Each structure stands twice: as structure tokens, then as C-alpha cells.
Amino acid sequence: MIKWILGVILILLILGVMLVIASQASTSWKTAETVRTPDERFANLSDYPFAPNYVEIEGYRIHYVDEGPRDGQTILLMHGQPSWSYLYRHMIPPLVEAGYRVIAPDLIGFGKSDKPLKQSDHSYQMHVDVMSAFAREIDLQGATLFAQDWGGLIGLRMVAEDQDRYARIMISNTGLPAASGLRGWIGYPMVRFIAWREGKPDAVVGEDGKFSFPRWIAFARHSENFTLETVFQGGTSRELSDAELAGYAAPFPDESYRAATRIFPMMVPSQLRQNQKVMDEVFAKWDKPFLTTFSDSDPVTAGGEKVWQKTVPGAADQPHTIIKGGAHFIQEDKPEELVQHLLAFIAAN
């Protein structure tokens, strides 16, 4: 009897291990069928006069803003979900005026870049690979990375891929979700299960009014109330104009364009082990300048600056700051302060 029970337990353990392994996100991908937002959707956008630039990477057309002198020091501005380079429209002109070359790409699935049709066409690894290839294609050199939201999850991995291309890093309201050991293996399946239990919520917050990341995953993936206008006004402390909200909605004429905006939250914990390796092998040894400028009113990333200040050697003795009055999309709430911090950071380092 005891042998039979032990046999059953062993079988269950083996099945559990196999299930956990099978539940890991794939690190392989292939170019998928896409849609491309019609150019007329971007006509006469509020405060976005920038000329378009395009490169072809792995069969995907990537759009990017490239302003300022070509021989100037380069600042790379990385956006997240569900935004696009429009998010940086108030930061690009003063940075250019200060003499810098400013590059702001649109991630695949966002802005003027190509948009894979299916949620399953997107993976964390695909976006890291494509954007790393983008940096090589435009021959990025001596760049200062500024990243927020998914701009950090992808941008920091881009740094890890080609460290010599980057001179310094400044981040705000972002991170690099990482875990080792058992947590690294079960984290993603557990988050998926919890998000599945959330069902199809109609609001991003529950009855208690508190933010829950699994609920955000479920809301973004399934809810008909997940509109760009709702997300951006909910993620800023100032009131956005109708024209500004229309600018954020411009890349997405209908649901067929929105696979990336829907699936990105689910992808956040999909490379915990890979990110931990990057933290250990790259950023725990990163002695180039590293600055955190998080906001004081972002429920998603509150306190996330501490791990970077503690882990990264290059973060020592830097003037880290918490910007007051800024919500998640801090580029909308406090663009002038971000520019001031960024310019001072580069000048001092």
C-alpha cells in the first residue's frame, strides 16, 4: 500500500514538473502576418509634427522618430503599453533644442510600426530580439537610454544584448521582473492561473478600489471597456484633452490592430528566469551611470526604484528622485521635470 501511495505521489510530482515546464513562455518565434495602420490616421495629430522614419527588421516595419543633429549625443526614448512615440511629444523638442539627437521608436504592435494580428504572435523574446536588431540596424552608439513601463522591460534587455552601445541609463516607472529558483519556474504559470480566475472584469480595479496586476491582465485581455482613452486618462494625474486621447487611439482603428495592447500585461512575468540572469550578469556589474526618476503616484511600480539603487553599482551616489504629482504615464504629467533630470544626468556623467 505504501509503495502504491509513493508511486502515485511520484507520478503526480513528475506530471507537475512537466506541467510547469510546458507552461513556460516560448523563447522561439517567427514573423507573423500583420496589419499596418493607414497613414491618414496620423494626420494632424496634436503636438506631433515629427517626420516618420522606417527600417525593416525580421520582416516587420518599425517606425521611429529621429530628430536633432546626426552627430549629436543620442538619447533613446522607449515607450511601453499601450502607448507609442506620441508619449514623448513634449520631451523630444527640448532635448533636440539642447543639442541632442533623439530617437523614439514604436514597438511592434504599436504606433506606426507593423502590428501582428494575433495575441499569440507576441512574445517577450520576440520584442527583445526585434528591438535589439533595431539598435544594431541604426548603429546606435554612446546612447543614453530613457525607459518607462514596457520600455524598461524591453529597453533594459536591449542594453544587456549590446552593452557597449549604451553610455548611461535613466528609468522611470518600470522594472525588470525577475526571479530565480522555484519562483522563477512557477511565477509565470501562477500569474496566468490567478489572472484566469479573475475572469473577464469590466473594470481595472475591484470593488475595494485597489489595483491588482492579475486583474489588469484579465481586464486588458478580455474587457470591452479596455479603451485607450480610459487607460490613459486613468494613468495620468492631469486631464488629457480630446485631441490628446485621439492621438493615443490613432494607431488602432479597430480591434484587429490591438493584439499587442491586449497581451502585453500577460507577458510581464513570462521571462523571470531570463531576467534574473540579466540582473545577475549585467546590471549587478553595471558601473556606468544609472538614475531612477520614478513618480509618487503610480500604483503599478511604486517602490520599484529601490532594487535598482541597491543592485546597480552605477546607481551609487546618483541624484535619484521621486517626482511629485506624476502618475504612471509620467511623460504626460511631468515632461519638463523629466527633461531637466535627463539633461542634468547626462551633463554630470
Image (tube, rainbow, N blue to C red):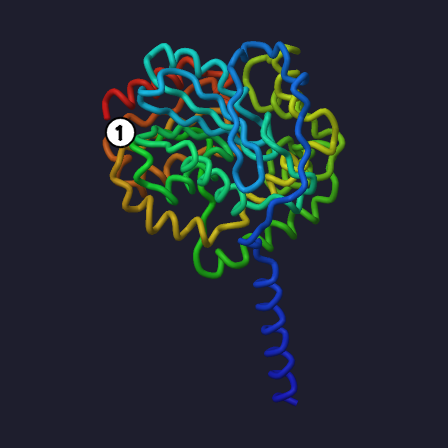
Q: x, y (%) of residue 18?
A: 60, 68
Amino acid found under the numbered disc labelled 1: Gln
> Which quadrant holds residue 139?
top left
Q: In front here: 118 or 233?
A: 118
Which one is nearer the viewer's eye here, 204 or 82?
Answer: 82
17 or 104: nearer the viewer: 104
Q: State whether residue 275 is above or below residue 249.
A: below
Q: Is residue 177 left or right of residue 9?
A: left
The image quadrant where one finds the C terminus is top left
Q: Secondary structure at mark 1?
A: loop
Q: Which residue is mark 1?
A: 318
Give the quadrant of residue 252. top right
Q: Position of residue 338 (x, y in %)?
A: 40, 19
- Residue at 65% across / 52% down in the picture? 193
Residue 97 falls left or right of residue 196: left
- Location of residue 297 in the rendering, given as x and y in whole percent from the top left corner: 49, 24
Spot occupied by residue 141 in the image (x, y as percentages of width and height): 33, 32
| Residue appearing at x 57%, y 57% in the figure | 24
Q: Quadrant of the N terminus?
A: bottom right
Q: Is residue 232 above or below residue 184?
A: above
Q: Considering only vertical position in the picture, is 30 above or below 329?
A: below
Numbered disc total: 1
Mark 1 crowdedness (10 Å alpha carbons): few <14, some 14-19, many ≥20: some
